[in-house]
Image (cartoon, rainbow, N blue to C red):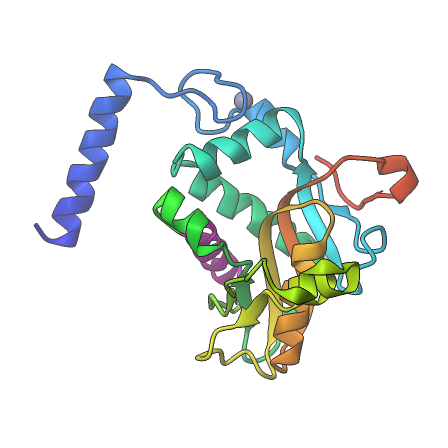
Amino acid sequence: MDDSAFNAFSCLSREFLGVLMPRGCAGCDAPDEVLCQSCLRLFSGAHRRDVDLGCKWPCFFCGFYEGAVRTAILSWKDHDDEECDRCFAALLARLALHVIGPAPSEGFLIVPAPSSSSSMRRRGRDHLLPVVRGMSMILRRQGIESYVSADLRIRNVHTKSVETRTAAGRSIRLEGSVCLMPRSRCSGREVLLVDDIVTTGTTMRRCAQALERGGAHVGVCLALAGSAKNVGAMGLTDIHSA
Ligand SMILES: [Zn+2]
């Protein structure tokens, strides 16, 4: 079966299954929607919190990781709701369009935060990759050159290492656990770093540090959702809300 026949078959199968088992919104289970309008609205912010996270890179996310936003992300990540890929790609592209400047002449390099090999085995896929690819396509359609490159990986960590007995040792171990792929060509490139959720900011920091050690410049970090804990105390800034 060639690709076009396979795609047509997939669409027919989805439509057929949709008649038998209509889907619900990934966030609130409203019928016949991947994400209903009210759940989409919860993802429509552009919240900035790099300062609160002690992160030197500008860090933005679409919605607070709670309620329907959390349910939708967990449904996508851990319950194989791949139909969310397109919605989340559009939301991240929309966020990027709000916060990035003009593309450099060689275009932005979009780098997804890596999943551990055990998470990928459990999910059967790298869930962030189709989303950042969709995001890049939307940006290109808007005249912003961008290319996806999965340049980061999580190095296997040996938890029984002597170094892990002290807080400093654990910190060194964590900092070292994200590294560049050997084939990375990020040097000299302007990077948009993308993760699904930002909570403490540790993963974003580790990813950004690995990229900059490889000679890239991380322009901005983007995520679908971020922790809403202690919002007031953290001085979270909304630069846009729908
Ligand atoms: Zn909903």
Q: Which stretch appears magenta?
A: 126-143
* 141 inside magenta stretch: yes
Q: Give how far across and how far down residue 164 sits, in percent.
A: 68, 61
Which residue: 67% across, 35% down? 65
**Residue 105 in which image quadrant:** bottom right
* 65 inside magenta stretch: no
Q: Is residue 34 left or right of residue 106?
A: left
Magenta region, mostly helix, strand or loop? helix
Q: Give how far across and how far down residue 3 sits, in percent.
A: 16, 53
Above/below status of 43 relative to 67 = below
Which residue: 46% across, 50% down? 131
Above/below status of 156 relative to 21 = below
> Looking at the image, which residue sits at the far left?
1
Q: Quadrant of the C terminus?
A: top right
The foreground one among 182 and 228 is: 182
Q: Give how far across and how far down residue 209 sits, in percent.
A: 68, 70
Q: Give how far across and how far down residue 238 sits, in percent.
A: 80, 42
Q: Is residue 220 left or right of residue 123?
A: right
Which residue: 66% across, 65% down? 162
Where is ligand 1, by quadrant? top right
Res 60 seen here: yes
Res 101 seen here: no
Above/below status of 31 relative to 134 = above
